[in-house]
Amino acid sequence: MTDQKTVVILGAGWAGLPLAHKLLKYTSSKTAIEVILVSPNSHFFWNVAATRGLIPGMIPDESMFIPIATGFDHYAVDLFEFILGRATDIQSSSNSVTILTNTGGSRTLQYHQLVIATGSRLAGGLPLKPIGTHEETLAAWHELQANVSRARDIVVAGAGPTGVEIAGELAAKFGKLKKITLIMRGDVPLESSSDVLSSVRTTLDKDLQKLGVELIRKTCVKAVEAGDDGKTQVLILDNGSRVITELYLPCHGIRLNNGFISTGFLDPQGNVNIDDNMRVVGTENIWAIGDVSNAGPKQLTVTDNQIVYLAGALDTALTGKDSIAPYQPVKKTMIFLSLGRKYATGQIGSWKLWGALVSYVKGRNLFVDTADGYVSGKHLRHSSM
């Protein structure tokens, strides 16, 4: 169709993948579109379960890594294309983006609308998020599992949600078989999150201690050196002390996947700078969503709200409707933390959740049973736009 509009989505993670499904499922029935989804990953990484999955034998690979392409098989072939590759340059003046494919080739895609949803990765390099292609991520994942299995002493640094859950999961699984230590900058877990209730922090602190996790407070890792035996690592803390461990898991900080984006599109912190319609500032047809943008907190719990909004905004732009209402960020704090299958806590707004409820909803299997449906677009909030 000569009047078909092309939407290119860069990134097939928690934001880009469901956004593609919503456009294909709802907007394609209103106007002629083609959605091109670009990602170096052939598989979706269900990393909400990575804090438990890094323990060998807990969650099989096929439940953690779900093929993306097959999740789109039910759409007409002229509506959708999945490209394995990554963007290297955006040419906004010509409405085009250059893609380096996983096979080494180069493609230039023309777009009517472009969405940047490339997300982030952990600053310390742990493969708890994709680190490259599926093959590269899977190899690093297996290496991490092998290291966890082998080590008798494991130190987790960073008492944010990821670090707390990993320390809890490791202690819940191994008990006294392995020494698990959590290093935190504050006096209690999640102290840097000002919107988290003190009762939630206290519960996490007590539960970690019940599980046998050693807590080192009010310090952080300043440097890491190789041990004299060639098998251990020496962590130099900013309080002057040293900790020797067989396995160090840094779980603090993220790096945005923004290397291909012009600095003119970024704010001083490196986020893609968007306006109140989630458009990239200074553009008419480039949008950004998720961790790579400054749409809000870098939390999975707020992503769904962004997807619903941007799908509606794109629907309006593609169908020629008059105006787009401003995006309203989620202001309600939502956290759900599980430390193994027994201990859990959470918060919605100013309400602390019962641990038993969080344990039942999340702690049992970390939503692994919903992964296939998510990747195939069966679990989309708001059925119409």
Image (cartoon, helix red, strand yellow):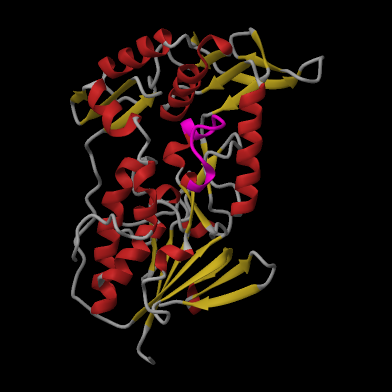
Residue 373 sits in quarter: bottom left
Q: What residue occupies the far bottom of the structure in this picture?
A: 2
Left or right: 355 in relation to 185 = left
In the rendering, at what x and y percent does residue 207 appear? 37, 13
> Up-down: is 150 above or below 7?
above
Q: Image quadrant for the C terminus?
A: bottom left
Residue 280 sits in quarter: bottom left
Which residue sits at x=25%, y=58%?
A: 309
In the rendering, at what x and y percent does residue 191 appear? 38, 19
Left or right: 210 in relation to 361 = right
In the rendering, at what x and y percent does residue 95 appear? 47, 76
Left or right: 222 in relation to 353 = right
In the image, the segment drawn in magenta is: 51-62
In this rendered view, identify the residue nearer to me: 227 or 192. 227
Which residue sits at x=54%, y=22%?
A: 157
In the rendering, at what x and y percent does residue 163 appear? 48, 25
